[in-house]
Amino acid sequence: MRWIVLAWFVFSAIYVFNRGTQRFKFWRQLSDHSTFLAPINIWCYLLSPIKPGPYIESSWFPELEPLRANWQTIRDEALAVDASQKIAAAANYSDIGFNSFFKTGWRRFYLKWYDAPHPSAQSLCPYTTKLLQGIPSVKAAMFAQLPPGASLVRHRDPYAGSVRYHLGLVTPADPKCYIDVDGQQYYWRDGEQVIFDETYIHYAKNDTNVSRIVLFCDIERPMRFRWAAAVNRLVSNTLMRAAASPNEAGDRTGVLNRMFKYVYAIRRAGKKIKAWHRPTYYVVKWTLFGSIIASVFYLI
């Protein structure tokens, strides 16, 4: 049994590594979270009717039309939140999913995250949260800001059970403010929507002097079979809900983020070792990874 599991893991990891035209180097991909979730993600790819590719036709999601149709009202609420300086980086290491993005300037205000809307969002954005709650396929939503000079590093998102939706609210409408998904660039425009597969390697840059704000949503990936859709919801509700991050006191914090500040203390220690002696850092890193994988393999 363990050899079957190992073979499936290796096959899934190779499949993920070879998706698209853009790839990480071998050692970078080996330690990426998309490798560890590959045995789950491959089912999302194989059982979805969506044709593989970085960008996805909006015709797959007609239920999202009310968002585009009401983009100006959504923009007004986003601007009010921005004026109150609540589109911000997380405090106290409480956002495991996006922690690495804050240091390059990216900011967010959560509307919902695989659950009911945050109380802070319902208070500040009543129209937008009500609109989102009327669309069951929207699993998570936020206002995401990319200020002038900010960027997002090349990355893959970890779980393939969703696809990513952006609706331009405040944008430079300039090719210098763009997202690149698997080597194909798109620049945001006010009132325009784009849907893409965030498990392809992607990054973003804003080289203009205008701050970009979009409505950012995770949309449930369509599946060919009802049982596959049910499994996808079960996994996402368990895995992704655990990464819920608050805007302020009173908002729900998932178990992963309650633990993250302690885990990050280990990460900081690793950074100190890396700054001191890189070979030692990599020996320790791969010894730990190897021990974890060997332990899991032994327990199967």
Image (cartoon, rainbow, N blue to C red):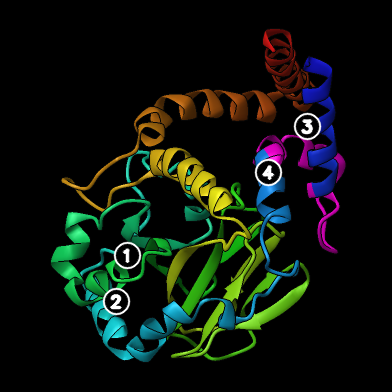
| Residue at image mark 1 | 87
Q: Which residue reaches farthest front?
A: 226
- Residue 61, position as x, y percentages in the image: 51, 76
Task: Specify whether residue 236 is painted magenta.
Answer: no
Identify the residue under disc 3.
Answer: 9
Q: Quadrant of residue 269?
A: top right
User: Taking 139 as reference, is 115 left or right?
Assistant: left
Q: CA distance from mark 1 to mark 2?
A: 9 Å
Label 4 close to label 1 by CB (< 8 Å): no
Q: Amino acid at mark 3?
A: Phe
Q: Give the distance between the C-alpha atoms of the residues marked 2 and 4, in whole angstroms.
A: 31 Å
Q: Earlier in the sequence, mark 1 or mark 3?
A: 3
Q: Residues within 10 Å of mark 2 (few under 14, many from 20)?
A: many
Q: Which residue is mark 2?
A: 78
Which of marks 2 and 3 precedes in the sequence? 3
Residue 93, can we see it?
yes
The part of the chain drawn in magenta is 16-39
Question: For the residue labelled by badge 4, is the local secondary structure a helix, a strand or a loop?
Answer: helix
Mark 3 and mark 2: Cα distance apart in space = 42 Å
Residue 155 pos. (x, y %): 66, 54
Q: Mark 4 sits on what residue?
A: 34
Q: For this view, does 177 lie left or right of residue 261?
A: right
